[in-house]
Image (cartoon, rainbow, N blue to C red):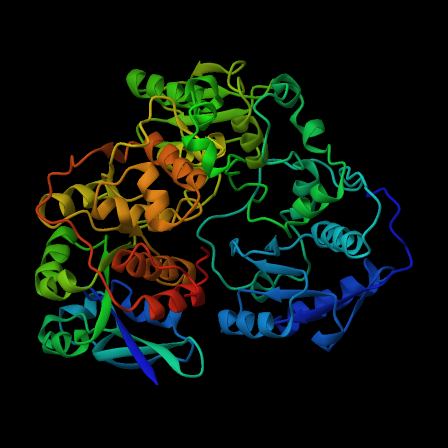
Amino acid sequence: MIMGNAKADVTLTVALVGVSSRSRAVLNMFFATKAGHFCRLVEDLSQAQVGIVDLDGPQASKILAEYRRAFRGPTLAMSVRDPELDDTVWLAKPVKTNALLAALMALRKLLTQAAPIAIAAPQEITPEPAPSVEKGSSDSPATERGEPTLKAASMASEAALDATPPDTDETATPSTAVAKPDKAAMRASNASDVRRAAGLAETERRRHPSYGTLDDADYKDPKQRHHSFYDPMAYLQGAVQKAFEVARDRQRPLRLKIQSDGIGLVIFPDRLEVQSEIREHLLRSLSMVKHGGDSVTVELLSADTKPSLSSNDARLQTQSGLSWKIALWTSLGRAPIGTDPSQPVTLLRWPNFTRVFISKHAIRIAALWSQQPTSLFDTARILEIEHRYVFSFYAAASAIGIVAYGDSIDSKHRPGGKTTQSGILGRLLTYLGARD
Amino acid sequence: MANYKIIFSGPVGAGKTTAVESLSDTPLVNTDATATDMTQSRKASTTVAMDYGVLYLDETERIHLYGTPGQQRFSFMWEILREGGLGLVLLIDNSRENPFADLDFYLHEFHEFIESTALVIGVTQMDRKATPTLHDYGDHLRSKFGNYPVFEADARKRRDMAILVQTLLYSLDPEVHAGV
């Protein structure tokens, strides 16, 4: 339930773009029944205040480009995978009715510029079990697989539950967030949090890392520099890393109990896999908080314990993938304590970018470090990016052991060429959806 | 009109045709024929000349996508196709008997092209056969060729193919900006 002073008589006009006929029929029904009291579908994009775009259809990129040229308003993007687009709210397919409803209501509030409001978890949405997103499923829209109704993962409920500002203040009392993450996450009290919850302002999203709030000057200011480092062992990151080591040393599956009811992570050292029983946004919240790992406990399991999920279930992931993700969440634009940002760093191996979250400027940083050892400070200068993105990438890469100081690669060839075709490369990158 | 080219290569069945199809803005133009020789055990049809797709950046600029034929008896086409290319996307089928032998063959075959442009490697079928692992590929590459990017890839997924191409472009020049 969204409370506040928004004018209830404003009708939000919505246009559908790139939507299949079957999806359109379902959405027509949705707008006629669930959202008809505050929304209206329009055929003409020029009359719309909000656009809903299906990014999984044929020629989706071309459709999106044309749409962006014609329309600059708020956009809800429906797709199987997060397109990681600026100024776009992502609705994961299959789209849940409540998620679409909450997103539209939040956008209407924003567009009517309501007085400061509070967002509480929608009353009709009950906490869900661990997400049932399946990895490796077809990219074709769910409705084209014969699904007659909209159902499954709820963006809006998760946004409501995880309205904890991503730029978590290091000095904030951590125990509240750790003990009752749901209530802390629901605390959103001003218009900027509305925008954040609607995903319209920044690229950081509810499962994505925050890159912190440090200015570039802080990284070089001797009085502020200590803020650009953190001790992984003081966070959940350290507890997870220790658990991996224990499981490996004991050669037995292990449960890392994170929540008070024992729910957490199940580690399979022989398979180098982890089965997550905890909702991702909660894991993210706990990762960001100092001492978030203090109350975790470890339980060794019998040697014949096997994952209960299929290999294409997103909740079953590689240890390195989880370590990467937790390090990004924890980093907040900082590097692990002991890092020397003025010493050249080299990339030992590339992160598996098709299967891990690609943090901002990650591919560029990886390409640079694979070609020439470069310090964190010089990387920011050469690539003309903020230090927090470099430090975050280093934190994640360090967590999975793929970086080292100096020219420690003993390779026959250091790959990388130079080109005078930066114009075409830039335009092609834009076309492919790269964001700089 | 400015024209540029990205080459997709790799052994038979690695996913080159599918990869070009995933990215192309237009329906794929391919030159399949019924497989006859040992290829038949892997696929019913195989590319005999090339697959062609295109990305339209705007009205005047396009990127040509070329998928080379996988069978070695068509290797004369590879020389023709790589002329003027931006770089190479090499797809390796992890379920084949010796993926490292495939990798070595193509890296030798395209050595000069890679030296002057860029390379990214996508390993397909890892869901069917998990080994060699990406870690193994990385060790193999570093010991023989260099620290080239190698990722797990599903040629049917446009996002995977887009990431491969993005990595190829950033490998050409890490300092390039999107939108320039």
Q: Is residue A158 left or right of residue A66?
A: right
Q: Where is the N terminus of chain B found, in terms of image quarters?
A: bottom left
- Residue A73 in picture, x, y percent from top left: 68, 64
Q: Foreground residue, A142 or A283? A: A283
Q: Is residue A3 visible?
A: yes
- Residue A109 in picture, x, y percent from top left: 80, 52
Compared to residue B66, the image places residue A87 above or below, namely: above
Q: Is residue A58 visible?
A: no
- Residue A137 in picture, x, y percent from top left: 47, 55
Q: Foreground residue, A130 or A200? A: A200
Identity of the residue drawn at 51% across and 16% down: A296
Which quadrant of the view contains residue A145? bottom right
Compared to residue A209, the image places residue A305 above or below, namely: above
Q: Foreground residue, A353 or B62? A: B62
Identity of the residue drawn at 20% across and 46% down: B137
The tally of labels here is 0
Q: Where is the C terminus of chain B found, in terms of image quarters?
A: bottom left
